[in-house]
Amino acid sequence: MFDLGYVDSLIRGGVPKEPFSSIFLNWELPKFSHNVYRACLYHLFHVDYPAAHTVCADGGANRLRDVLAAYGDESAPSVILGDLDSVDPDVLSRFRALGTEVMQITGQDDNDFAKSLTYLAQTLDPASVRRNVVVLGAIGGRLDHTIANINSAEIGPIDTGLVHMFSKDEVAVVLPRGVSTVTLPDAAHTVGLLPLFGETVMSTSGLEWDVHGAAMRVGGMISSSNAARERVVRVESRDRPVCMTASLVE
């Protein structure tokens, strides 16, 4: 069971009941980014739940700085990490002075998003690793960056269905091979099922145009511009993981 219903609470400015961690990447962030950040801080300081990390991947710190400045927010993220070639030195100095941990990780085999997932997997206690990770700025913009981030979510150390990747108006999640039950947010509009990891036989229920035992692959049949007929949908991918997308209407 993968639950995206908490997104409605974030859009409205509420605090989801379940704690989560967040990663800010260096791309356009959704309007509710500050709500994500404050919800993490709420769980960290009011519920005293240590899983509520706020991680900035390199230049993602610049993006978060702009969000915080727009709200007059003088707080700071938990950690900034990556090769640190994109973060503004003034941003780095300011957040470090406010207590942010700075980690330079120079290896080039992984992108900064992958490094962030590894950091969380190594830092969180085993129970917390089962919590959602909200990744802002992960999709949209350069196609190679988007595909690389989706790939990092699939091969990374945190269960793929728990890594929720956002653009300014969309969410994507990699569903594992097998049967997945997904609770969509009310804000979900169009839905896509993209067989990015190889050909797979798929069946669905709860969508406007369900498929039943359909062989899907890039270069063949895919399901794009679909829509949710029910809030809870079932996706079975027999052979490979599949990337599910949902556009969000605030």
Image (spheres, rainbow, N blue to C red):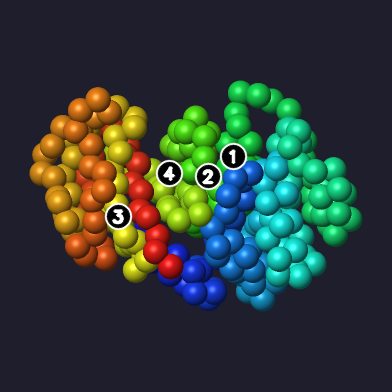
Q: Which of marks 4 and 2 is nearer the N terminus?
A: 2
Q: Distance between the residues labelled 3 and 4?
A: 21 Å
Asked if residue 162 lies left or right of residue 29, the reply is: left
Q: Earlier in the sequence, mark 1 or mark 4?
A: 1
For discs 3 and 4, the disc positioned in front in the rendered view: 3
Secondary structure under badge 4? helix
Asked if residue 153 lies left or right of residue 177, the reply is: right
Q: How far apart are marks 1 and 2 (CA)?
A: 8 Å
Callout 3: 10 Å neighbours few (<14), some, many (20+)? some
Q: Mark 3 points at which residue?
A: 190
For discs 4 and 2, the disc positioned in front in the rendered view: 2
Residue 16 place in picture, x, y as percent: 50, 71
Q: Name the residue under label 4.
A: 160
Q: Mark 1 points at which residue?
A: 113
At label 4, the amino acid type is Thr
At label 1, the amino acid type is Phe
Name the residue located 80 percent from the left edge and 67 percent from the top edge: 74
Q: How far apart are marks 1 and 4 (CA)?
A: 14 Å
Secondary structure under badge 3? strand
At label 3, the amino acid type is Thr
Say whether residue 121 is visible: no
The part of the image, by quadrant, that contains residue 34 is bottom right
Q: Earlier in the sequence, mark 1 or mark 2?
A: 1
Callout 2: 10 Å neighbours few (<14), some, many (20+)? many
